[in-house]
Each structure stands twice: as C-alpha cells, then as structure tokens.
Image (cartoon, grey):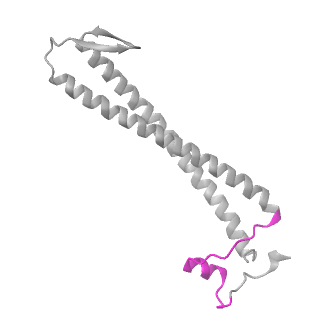
Amino acid sequence: ARQNQQPRVCKNKHSTKEHAAQGKMAPITIPEDKQEEWQKLQEQHAQQRKLFQNTAAQMAVLEREKARNGLTNAELDKLPAETIMYKQVGKMFVQTPGDKVKSEISEETKSFDTRMGELGTKRAAYEAAIKETEGQLQAIVDKAIAAGGSE
C-alpha cells in the first residue's frame, strides 16, 4: 500500500527530496521485502570498512618502519668503515660487519616496499567494494523515497 503513495510532505509543504537538498532528512522506512538485503549490505559495508581501516593501519606501520630504516641507514653511512657494529639477536648482541647490517636494512626496506604495494592493491579493492556497497544501499534508500517510504 505504501509503495503507491507519493513522498510525504512536511508542514512547510516541502517534499522529502527538498528536505534532503536542505540537509533536513526525514526518517526513511525501508520496505519489508528489502530489509533483509539492507541488513546484509550494512553488515558487509561495516566489514569492508574494518578491512580497509586495518589495511591502512598496516600501511602506516610499514611507512614508519621504512622511515626508521632510512634514518638508520643515513646514520650508518656517517660512520667510518672500521666501526665495530653489533646486531641484536634475541636478548644478546652479536658483532656483525657493517656492510652486512646495511644490506640487511636495505633488504628489509625492499620487503617493506613490496608489502606496501600489496597492501595498496588490497586497500584500493576494499575502497571500490565500499563504494559499490554504498551505491547499493543508496539505491535501496532512493527506491524507498520514491515509493513514499519516508515518514
């Protein structure tokens, strides 16, 4: 019965779409046949946002580690070649040649770059999925508004 009704008009004779344009959204009632889909899409959207945020956090950690490695390499380059260096292994420190320390840091930085590329791809995929889900949710809302589902 509600689907055949026109959008409701407020006391000021504005339609729901005019309220939306003014930033005064009226509550929307999702049709019963779309409520299950709405719920699933909302859960999917929340999960996608969580994955996106986790990926962004991992990328931020890698960026900090990469910056730290860059600073460490810069400091190591300032040291004379004959400087004795120690590398931490568990709770102990082992004397290690400076070239080996520098190469390990460079390799670690390269692995960070590779991992950042992988995470960037994942983040872009999550962002696209989020936009798609938001579009599907918006389509349901638009249909509800068109069907007069606002109160």
Where is residue 2, by image quadrant? bottom right
> Would you place residue 112 above or below residue 94 in this image?
below
- Relative image position of residue 100 (x, y in whole percent): 28, 13
The magenta region covers 11-32
User: Could you say which quadrant of the image residue 36 lies in?
Assistant: bottom right
Q: Is residue 73 left or right of residue 3?
A: left
In the image, residue 58 lies at what x, y percent? Answer: 47, 37
Residue 4 on image: x %, y %: 81, 78
Q: Residue at x 59, y 78 (%)?
A: 24
Q: Is residue 15 magenta?
A: yes
How many labels were placed on the picture?
Answer: 0
Rendered view: 11 above or below 132: below
Instruction: Tell me: 18 left or right of 90.
Output: right
Vertical relation: 9 (above or below) 99? below
Specify whether residue 114 is painted magenta.
no
Q: Overall secondary structure of the magenta stretch?
A: loop
Left or right of 110? Residue 25 is right
Rendered residue at 62%/75% (across/down): 25
